[in-house]
Amino acid sequence: MAECYVTADITSGDESLVEAVSLYNQYASMYINYYMSGDVVVTLDSSTFMDWFSLDVENQPSFDYASVAAWVEALADTYDTIGTYEPFVTSNGETVYVESVTYGWKMDREAETEELYSLLLAGQTEGRSPVWTNSVLTRGTNDVGDTYVEIDYTNQRMWYYKDGELLVETPVVTGDVSDGNASPEGMFYIVYKKQDAVLTGETYETPVDYWMPFYGNVGIHDADSWRSSYGGTIYMTNGSHGCINTPTAQAQTIFENIEAGTPVICYSSSINYGYSTASSGTSYVANSSSGSSDSSSSGTDNDDDNIVIIDGNSSDSTGTSSSGTNTTGGGSTETNRIDDDDDSTSSGGTSNSDAEFEITISDETVWTDGSASGSASDGSSGGTSGSEDGVIIIE
């Protein structure tokens, strides 16, 4: 009877078989968690990689390298943002799509494939972040967060937000389009900042006080030493070599509050909102039915230029007198009043159609429209405010 059965070469007690079973069980239970920043976690487990797994004749684990590389490619395609067009809601409420040129996420696919292959061979559960060639501080819609510079080429306007607070809104002059020097569009970041820099090119050598490059030789800097006005259509025929020419006071405020790595979003709006050309150190506010400045819902500007704006309404029949605090360049603080919408008399001053107005602020603060009979249009000295063009001039 015994001769009727063939004796098995490998039995359940075979050491090689036991080892192979142990390795299969080990790999079946392992996984790798990829932390992609923020709350995003991608898990690679045996349900995916066991198709790539095998043991050689000596029970050494092996993985199909091409399959590992393909998985990394798919991961990068999903989470890389460099080269993609991201939605961005502008300060004027328009949604634009801006290419992530240098600001965003980009995985080093070759290096990450090597790292993952080694981890799989080790057979240990791991948690890791991919190898990035480009990374930023946030992950989410456009990855911008609440600290950034925004530049609208159509409207020649720049905003700087820090921790969600608007610190600077200013007209600018960007690259001269008539000379083929249009400023670049896209999502970039401040590479570094330098005080008292000298900008050089083939035909110029220009000293500036505040230099903040964000793309090659293109950056934000002061320009009062050769420009007396900003905004409007200046950039079409008398623009820069590509940089963002900025009033010196505003460039200083940005410089003192910004850090390397801060995103810079540059785009051309599809809407011209009608911002006018402004003299050096001048900021314009658009008319508002609510009677508030377009740069601050409270009408208060806390920048170093120290201005308080309450914008006018096209109707002067229902508005009320609004107050604001103004800190002068000399460091003193005054509280003044602007007659926002109505034609009432305040402390002896008469406001005639005040739908739009002009305010001049200097070391000795005077609010005037240029035609006032007194020293202040808030009426404290009998001044009369007429209808003006909605401009704020800071001297």
Image (spheres, rainbow, N blue to C red):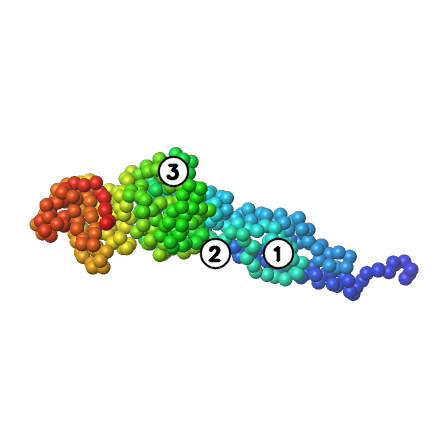
> For the residue marked with disc 3, what is the amino acid?
Asp
> For the residue marked with disc 2, what is the amino acid?
Gly
Q: Residue drawn at (26%, 43%), measured in percent from left and top?
A: 279
How many C-alpha atoms fall within 10 Å of the one at disc 1: few (<14), some, or many (≥20)? Answer: few
For the residue labelled by badge 1, is the local secondary structure a helix, a strand or a loop?
helix
The label on residue 38 is 2
Query: Closer to the N terminus: mark 3 or mark 2?
Result: 2
Q: CA distance from mark 3 to mark 2?
A: 40 Å
Where's residue 33, x and y in %?
A: 56, 58
Q: Nearer the viewer, residue 220 or 388?
A: 220
For the residue labelled by badge 3, is the local secondary structure a helix, a strand or a loop?
loop
For the residue labelled by badge 2, is the local secondary structure a helix, a strand or a loop?
loop
User: Is 233 placed above or below 167 here?
Assistant: above
How many C-alpha atoms fall within 10 Å of the one at disc 3: few (<14), some, or many (≥20)? Answer: many
User: Is 312 placed above or below 165 here?
Assistant: above
**164 lies left or right of 389:** right
Q: Are marks 1 and 3 in contact (CB under 8 Å)?
A: no
User: Is 351 placed above or below 25 here?
Assistant: above
Where's residue 338, x and y in %?
A: 17, 49
- Residue 290 is drawn in which quadrant? top left
> For the residue marked with disc 1, what is the amino acid?
Glu
Q: Residue drawn at (31%, 47%), measured in percent from left and top?
A: 224
User: Which residue is denoted by mark 3 in the rendering?
Assistant: 176
Where's residue 85, x and y in %?
A: 47, 42
Q: Residue drawn at (21%, 40%), measured in percent from left and top?
A: 389
